[in-house]
Amino acid sequence: MAQAGFTEIELEVTRRYSREDVGDMIPQVFTHVDAALVDDTISRFASTFVRAVKPQG
């Protein structure tokens, strides 16, 4: 965003996801992976508000 000219860039995470949020939609590739790694991977997904200013000029 900065390279596109935006300033005052703010990211506000509004929700982090968990295994319970994903439910049965966990990809098959995760069926052979340690549960802690699956939880860690899923927790990296989030809903985020993005705020920034594009100066006039």
Image: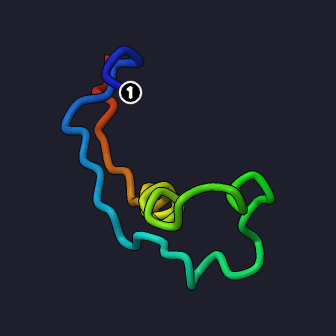
Relative to 23, say whether 12 is above or below: above
Q: Nearer the viewer, residue 30 or 44?
A: 30
In x, y percent, where is residue 6? 32, 28
Q: Nearer the viewer, residue 42 or 45?
A: 42
Relative to 38, say whether 9 is above or below: above
In x, y percent, where is residue 38? 53, 61
Graded by Cα atoms within 10 Å as few (under 14), some (14 to 19) or many (20 or more), the crowding at tag 1 reads few
Q: Nearer the viewer, residue 41 or 53?
A: 41
Q: Residue at x 32, y 50 (%)?
A: 51
Residue extending furthest toward the right? 28
Instruction: Determine whether, in the image, residue 31 is placed left or right of residue 43.
Output: right
Question: Is residue 47 in view?
Answer: no
Instruction: Determine whether, in the image, residue 31 is placed left or right of residue 49.
Output: right
Q: Residue 33: which quarter of the image? A: bottom right
Q: Residue at x 47, y 56 (%)?
A: 37
Q: Which quadrant holds the N terminus?
A: top left
Q: Residue 48: which quarter of the image? A: bottom left
Question: Is residue 2 in view?
Answer: yes
Q: Residue at x 49, y 55 (%)?
A: 41
Instruction: Determine whether, in the image, residue 28 is placed left or right of residue 11.
Output: right
